[in-house]
Image (spheres, grey):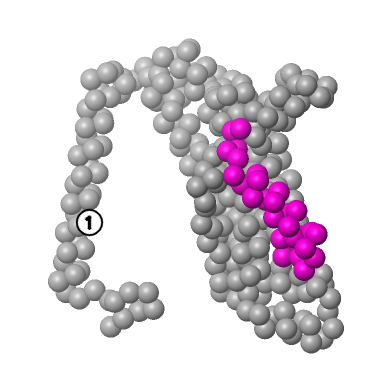
Amino acid sequence: MTSVLYDTPGPKAKVRNWIYSAVFLVLIGLALWWALGLMSEKGQLEADKWSPFVTDGEVWTTFLIPGLLETLKAGAIAMVIALPLGALLGIGRLSDHTWVRIPVGAVVEFFRAIPVLMLMLFGYQLYVQFTDVPSETRPLFAVVTGLVLYNAAVIAEIVRAGVLSLPSGQTDAAKAIGMRKGQTMVHVLIPQAVTAMLPALVSQLVVILKDTALGGAVLGFAELMSMNRQISANYSNTIATLLVIALLYITVNFALTTFASWLEGRLRQSKKSTGAVVEIALKAGDAA
């Protein structure tokens, strides 16, 4: 038998797949055993390295929770600004007017090609030189600026790809009933393209949350990842702290993707979806 994407494996192929899976699991287990053994030799598995996260509430109230809130704040502000800005840029790239399409395309390609860290650094220096933003909030402003500029450009490409993934008959039908280009985009194409864009959009929102750590590493932004230095200085438990912070990132991003999956299911049930899914192929210049 065959499916749309590949031939259904036969008995021998199934056996090989099971063998490959077993070998892979064994290798993963050996790597984990080696890592735990190395940590044990270095004293990283001792109780005093991990007990502060259970017995000392100040680790959470002073460091982890405030850092997590700063990460969520910066990520939320950047998302709220980048999503509509990216949508506008994406629609601009689809414009029939050359004087709109070409400048918007240049802006999108320009900011997609610059690493987000560089945008944060430029933003920080601009706020230092040309604004009266207080030094306490300047790192937050710079982080949000870099995240918005870069991710709005990426979201613009997601929107453009989502609209182009729709059958041409949707546009033809809108024209047949006398709808203008703007009306067609707002009332016909965008609503149907949302479900196609949603997986890629969620992936980009996760990237926004994780990239806030760049501001902590370079600009002194007091986000979650930067709390590693302060906790390690007080408790001498760098490895344990990094693992706990990683679990917090995983929890937040899992909650975000779970909500997005639920929302996508609801949108598909509304029968406004074509079933298409947008995949973004990043260019070399898109890597932050």
Give the quarter of the image for residue 124. top right
Q: Residue 36 at x, y = what percent? A: 26, 30
* Amino acid type, label 1: Ser
Establish if 205 lies above or below 75. below
Give the quarter of the image for residue 3. bottom left
Q: Residue 62 at x, y = what percent? A: 59, 20
Residue 117 is a magenta residue:
yes
- Tell me if I can see residue 155 in this picture: yes
Establish if 228 lies above or below 270. above
Residue 218 is a magenta residue:
no
Report the span colored magenta.
91-118
Q: Residue 187 at x, y = what percent? A: 78, 72
Q: Residues within 10 Å of mark 1 (few under 14, many from 20)?
A: few
Q: Nearer the viewer, residue 117 or 18?
A: 117
Q: What residue is rendered at 68% in x and 30% in y?
A: 122
- Report the residue that reaches farthest toward the bottom: 176
Question: On the rendered structure, is 35 left or right of 198?
Answer: left
Q: What residue is rendered at 72% in x and 79% in y?
A: 171
Q: What residue is rendered at 56% in x and 31% in y?
A: 214
Mark 1 residue element? helix
Question: On the rendered structure, is 68 left or right of 174?
Answer: left
Residue corresponding to mark 1? 21
